[in-house]
Every structure is written in C-alpha cells, then in structure tokens.
Amino acid sequence: MTNTTSIETKEGPLHHTRSAIAVLNSSYVLIDASDSLCRLIGVEAEALRGVNWFRIFPGLSKDWKIKLDHTLHGVKDIVITDPITGANGEMKNYVWQLNPWNDVSGKQYGIAITIAPE
C-alpha cells in the first residue's frame, strides 16, 4: 500500500470491522479509526484523523511512547492494559494490542492498534 486513501473512506475494510482499531503513522498521528473505536470514545473518525495519539488519549500511561517506539522497530503483539473514559463517561480498563502496520512487501508504514474491553 503506497497511500492511505483506501483506509480513509467509509468503504474501506477498517470501517466494517466490529473491532475497535486505530492506525497511526510513524509520528503517532492517527491515520484512521474504525467505526467501533469512534463509537467507543464518542468522536467521528474525521475529527480524529491527523491528530496525535497522545492528544486523543492524554491520560495513557507513561510507557506508551516506549512501546510505540518498539512497535515501530518491528516488535509485534505488544499488549498494554490502560483505562480510558468512553463516550458514556464511564472509565474502564481496555487491552490495547500494538502491531507494526506493514504492506505485503514488509515495508512498515506505522502502527495498528486493536482495543478490547478487559
């Protein structure tokens, strides 16, 4: 994949998944988010695109930057448990799984994050 156009539309597969997923570039800027993630935090994907991950989730634990850096260096299946406040105002723990976002040739574009309730 040489551009992000296909994942930035409602027709892309990211928006049809039931999983809460975020895709970040190598600068930790959100490229796109699944509809499930948007519903979870109560914000539309269009408002999230182009925003730094730490501005979207300012209360994340301090080890996030280190773990994101490790993911950018190819480490797979990094898991973090951290709370966030959902759209309903309830704070709840979530399991965040970080993986490199690569194309079929192995070129890394950023990070894919899957979020699930603990």
Image (cartoon, rainbow, N blue to C red):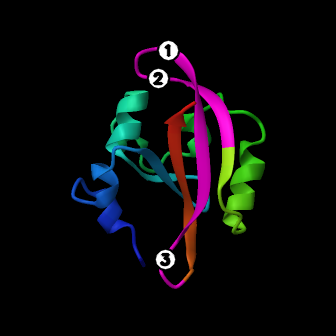
Q: At numbered mark 3, what does the secondary structure look like: helix, strand or loop?
A: loop
Quadrant hosting residue 91: top right
Q: Check disc 3 and report the residue beneath it.
A: 103
| Boundaries of the magenta span | 80-105
The residue positioned 32% from the left and 67% from the top of the image is 5
Q: Position of residue 108 (x, y in %)?
A: 58, 73
The residue positioned 52% from the left and 85% from the top of the image is 105
Q: Residue extending furthest top?
A: 89
Q: CA distance from mark 2 to mark 1?
A: 6 Å
* Label ID, residue 90: 1
Earlier along the polypeptide chain: callout 3 or callout 2? 2
Q: Amino acid at mark 3?
A: Asp
Q: Residue extending furthest front?
A: 118
Is residue 14 at least partly visible in the picture?
yes
Say which of 49 and 92 sits in front: 92
Q: Position of residue 71 (x, y in %)?
A: 68, 60
Q: Tell me if label 2 and label 1 are in contact, CB under 8 Å.
A: yes
Q: CA distance from mark 3 to mark 2?
A: 31 Å
Q: At numbered mark 1, what does the secondary structure look like: helix, strand or loop?
A: loop
Q: Amino acid at mark 1?
A: Glu
- Main SS of the magenta segment? strand
Say which of 14 and 48 sits in front: 14
